[in-house]
Amino acid sequence: MVIKGQTAYVQAGAGIVYDSDPESEYQETLNKAKSLLEVSKK
């Protein structure tokens, strides 16, 4: 996470393998980013 002024930048990803479900992987990245942003609000 990088914080510049009042803006926080986060990067999250997931491991894509042969039988990955694209929607599940996308949701995983959103959940990871959301967790980082929630912690930064405290």
Image (spheres, helix red, strand yellow):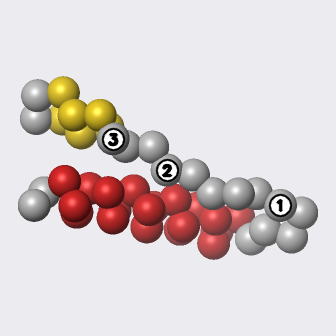
Q: Residues within 10 Å of mark 1 (few under 14, many from 20)?
A: few
Gap between marks 3 and 1, in whole Å? 26 Å
- Residue at the far top: name it: 4
Circles 2 and 1: CB atoms closer than 8 Å: no
Q: Residue at x 74, y 71 (%)?
A: 21
SS for tag 1? loop
33 horizontally vs 4: left or right: right
Q: Position of residue 4 (x, y in %)?
A: 18, 27
Q: Mark 3 is on which residue type?
A: Met
- Residue with the mark numbered 2: 12
Q: Earlier in the sequence, mark 3 or mark 2?
A: 3
Q: Residues within 10 Å of mark 3 (few under 14, many from 20)?
A: few
Q: Residue at x 19, y 53 (%)?
A: 40
Quadrant location, the N terminus: top left
- Label drawn at residue 37: none
- Residue at the far right: name it: 18
- Residue with the mark numbered 3: 1
Q: Mark 2 is on which residue type?
A: Ala
6 horizontally vs 33: left or right: left
Q: Mark 1 is on which residue type?
A: Val
Q: Residue at x 76, y 57 (%)?
A: 16
